[in-house]
Amino acid sequence: MEWDWQFVWQIMPTLLEGFKITIIATLLGSVLAAIVGMVFAVLRRSPNPYVARPVGLVAEFIRGTPLLVQLYFLFYVLPSAGILLSPLVAGVIGLGLHYGTYTAEVYRGGIDNVPRGQWEAAKACNLNPVQTWVHVIMPQAIPPMIPALANYFIAMFKETPLLSAITVLELMNQARSIANTNYRYIEPMTMVGVFFLTVSIVSVFGLRWLERRYGRVER
Amino acid sequence: MKKLIFGGLAAMTAVAAIAIGAQAQDNPKLDQLKEQGFARIAIANEPPFTAVAADGKVSGAGPDVAQAVFERLGVPEVVASISEYGAMIPGLQARRFDVVTAGLFMKKDRCEAVAYSEPILCDAEAFLVKKGNPKGLNTYADIAAHADATIGAPGGGTEERLALDAGVPRDRVVVVPDGQSGLRMLQDGRLDVYSLPVLSISELVRLAKDDSLEMIAPISDAPVYCDGAAFRKGDEALRDAFDVELAKLKETGEFAKIIEPYGFSAAAAMSTSREKLCAAQ
């Protein structure tokens, strides 16, 4: 089996098409995970146990089951309940929810790192809970956790091939369909690896920069 | 006396060794299969071509014919592994299976990639659509001409290729992992058409018991295809041995006895040949 450059160039447009979907899924999934994570983290800290407990249970449940199972559930089971999601939307929700439960832990760490005195000062200034979160706690909690969040987003990026299981035409699925019609795996699969590696390497440099910029906790 | 027995044994072993040696030159691949006692076949899970029951038992017309032929060749068992259609030929080339018996229809480019046996299972193509065919899709060309109709087909299967060749854009040809998912996606409105061979769609309709679906068959812009057992290029000796036994099965009528209960026509397979099918388009 030998490497065929001509074949590589021939399949490149199709792979790029898939790569676009992979990137879109990752970006949307990251935004969703960032929001879901924050909601989970804040609700879990609620003084009301009837809010905190169920949210904690749901988060544990999502974190304790495989992403692939959740994707199948979103795509094949929900329609019986009348909820019909397009493949990409189901995929983004799956990624966002799953990784949201992980980023919730990052938020929790970040929030716990805000000194107790800040909470007390907010209370002393007569700020209500919303003001306390928005103006005092989050601005101090978020910067140190940016590198950890970014880490999860890179991990999510590498999980996107799972979306091929629910018929999203992302990079992996395009590569498979190329292999299916040409009976050659070596070029498409290698190129999938190259695409992922390129983005991962660039991301690692970005991550280092983020760490230098935000990683230090100032006391 | 003892000496005599030993002598006799030695002579017998020598004869056997010569016999095996002679045969080994003929067909080393077949000898290897005989020795290990089984042949590895690739199947899909698409009744009635190939079927895997809940308990893992393999049946279907393809594996049954393979079993019968290999038994006659002196290989008592076939071990099946499930594969996507598109992965079968690469898997064959990568020596993951010895032969593909899954309804992998003969087409020109496939004939160039593998060594097919003589035809075994023949079938036309069919569509499964919502009752009344709301989008009026009767051919692959209809789907291509429609503004937003989607078609589901097995990955690397003949139907996927037919749709793409007819000009349906890639993003409207959905790769469906198995029959059950295809049925589900059609019921949920994710697909407008699910395309498989006629017998596969009939089987699916029978199992689904869903009055809201309807089968369209045969599809006029797709020919009747036949599959054959697909061997690796280089295993032509094994393929030829397979063909000899297959021809005998066809002659004795045993072939018809195996495939007709599944709904396949033995006459269709016997009226054509590999040469004809591989030459066509």
Image (cartoon, coloured by chain):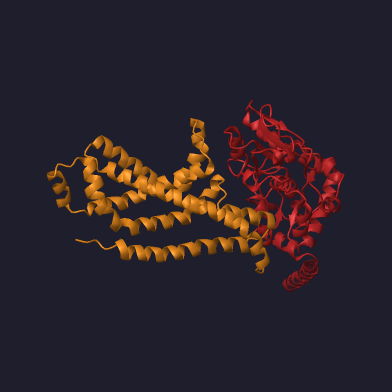
Near-viewer residue (A63 or A95): A95
Q: Quadrant of the N terminus of chain A?
A: bottom right
State which chain is coloured red. B
Residue at 60% in and 38% down: B180
- Give above or below for B215 relative to A188: above
Residue A144 x %, y %: 28, 58
- Give above or below for B132 relative to A203: above
Residue B244 falls in image quadrant: bottom right
Left or right of B236 on screen, residue A60: left
Residue B183 x %, y %: 61, 36
Residue at 58% in and 42% down: B55
- Give above or below for B260 relative to B238: above
Q: Quadrant of the C terminus of chain A?
A: bottom left
Residue A130 x %, y %: 24, 41
Residue at 49% in and 51% down: A24
Residue B21 visible in image: yes
